[in-house]
Image (cartoon, rainbow, N blue to C red):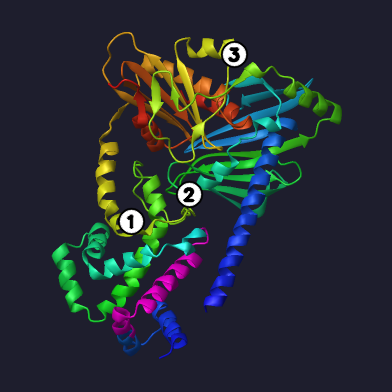
Amino acid sequence: MLKKTGIVFLALVSSQVYASEAGINLLVKMNDALHRMNYSGTLVHIKGNDVNTLHVTHELKNGVATETVNSLNGENKSVSSQTQTFSLAKVPKSVESMREVYSLDVGAMKKVAMRGCQVMIARPKDKMRYLQKYCIDIETGLPLDYSLIDNTHKMVERFTFTNVNISEPHSEVLAEADLASTSAPPQTLIEGHSHESGNWTITELPKGFSFGKLPLSQASEVNMGADTEHLLLTDGLSSVSIFISPIATAQPKVASTINSGALNVLTSQKNSHRITLVGEIPRSTMQTIFDNLEHRGGN
Amino acid sequence: MNHITKEEYLSAFVDGEAGSFEEHRICDQLQTDDTMREKLSSFALIGESIRDRSQTDAGVASPSFLSGIQNAIADDEPLIEVQEDSTLISLDAARTKKKRTLPKQAFGYAVAASVAAVAAISIQNFSATTESDQQIADASVPKSAERVNTGSVLPSLKQPVKKVAQNDYFIATSYKAPDAKTRGLMNKYVAHHLQYASSSTLMPRVRAVSYSTDF
């Protein structure tokens, strides 16, 4: 019995290692496709009982990716932006640490928007983050379906294409994009703040989370407020921002939260500072981070 | 009974396939035979490992894992506490119930081994979420595959009691709906986060549009 058990055990271990490697490869392919492919289509975004239909276009031109998202629900809301193209240097270095907190499983083949896709599940090993389920286009690597599920098996958010056209840009365009990416001035990306930043420290980070990189520009500082400190934590798949700004006048210590699908916002006060956390993580994890945030020098 | 026979009997015992006579005999032997006790814990652990594919490292539990089981057998209280915590059976009622059940010692070993194995496997989930508010056991969430410090098996059995107290804090944390000024500030930070601090490109933009229709 022991021999048989051992063989079964070894087989299970090896198959899981293989699945994890395949999952990582799919994630990298997906990130690459999101940045390098041209695509246009209708995307349905479901949050609880709310359904929003959007038109999404992404085009790589002159080394720059232009992305436009329009709501088709009559609200006439849209977001358009130009982003720097993908670089391998931006793939999270935390693949290993990601494996500590997620089990990456490759699932069945499905069809979404009439295209064949491979299911990939990033299953959290604790309750500090959401389960993330992707269906990744077999041909191009673009995610055609993406959902986030909480620990009570409740789907908190889902994105799914109902139709999509995907094309690979010409090799010259990709080469331009690669060139633009590698020649970008290094100061556009700064290292995330260290464990202890300014007057604030996080005594214990939630498992798997580490400080991420932040783009810094004049515009971002203006949008955020010049005296606001911005820390970024990421576990490789989810991220949470911590904004810290001084409060001039004494205010009652009231904690407020809002929620939109997987996105949670928590704001409260500590040591005459307003602390606001924004991210795609459960509120309880946010509360833990907030609790562990300490003003150096004591209260 | 040679060692091969013992293993077969133990395997049947763990699988619940041993007859009552064999169960009694195995129980008697378990009280005196260290090797048998080790094998029992190994069988229980292997069984749990197979049932939970993700527990790759759980198969290399340290020797103190066995002492955890032995302690659990020697001291009924942790087991009763588990019952008390999960089924709200009172301590006295649990003791009375235990006295009435005859093959309890046999089942005691099996339950202790299984509970200890499951507890060992689940320790990291508990430790990783001690400050989390979720109380519901999520059987589908695979446990982490790190080595387990089995010396803490018994304390972990008591941990749910402490978790309730910790979660009371979170439940007691009251949140209020933000006023207009706070909402404006939050919206600004949400926009900033979605624009600059997200790890992928497609979903943040979609979330931004969707969020703007919410608030």
Of helix, strand and loop, which one carries label 1? helix
Disc 1 with disc 2 on a shared chain: no
Tag 2: amino acid: Lys
> Given the image, what chain letter belongs to the residue carrying mark 3?
A
B66 sits left or right of A16 in the view: left
Of helix, strand and loop, which one carries label 3? loop
What secondary structure do most residues of the magenta stretch adopt? helix
How many neighbours does mark 2 have within 10 angstroms: few (below 14), some (14-19), or many (20 or more)?
many
Tag 3: amino acid: Ser
Of the two numbered discs 1 and 3 in the rendering, the one whose residue sits closer to the viewer? 1
How far apart in space, not on screen, are marks 1 and 3 (Cα)? Answer: 49 Å
A90 sits left or right of B17 in the view: right
Q: Residue at x 48, y 17 (%)?
A: B188
- In the image, which disc is placed on residue B152? 1
Picture coordinates of residue B211, whole percent (x, y): 51, 26
> Given the image, what chain letter belongs to the residue carrying mark 2?
A
Residue under pointer 3: A217
Boundaries of the magenta span: B26-55
Q: Residue at x 26, y 81 (%)?
A: B103
Res. B170 image quadrant: top left
Q: Name the one closer to the observer, B109 or A55.
A: B109
Of helix, strand and loop, which one carries label 2? loop
For the question of whether residue A107 can be seen, the reply is no
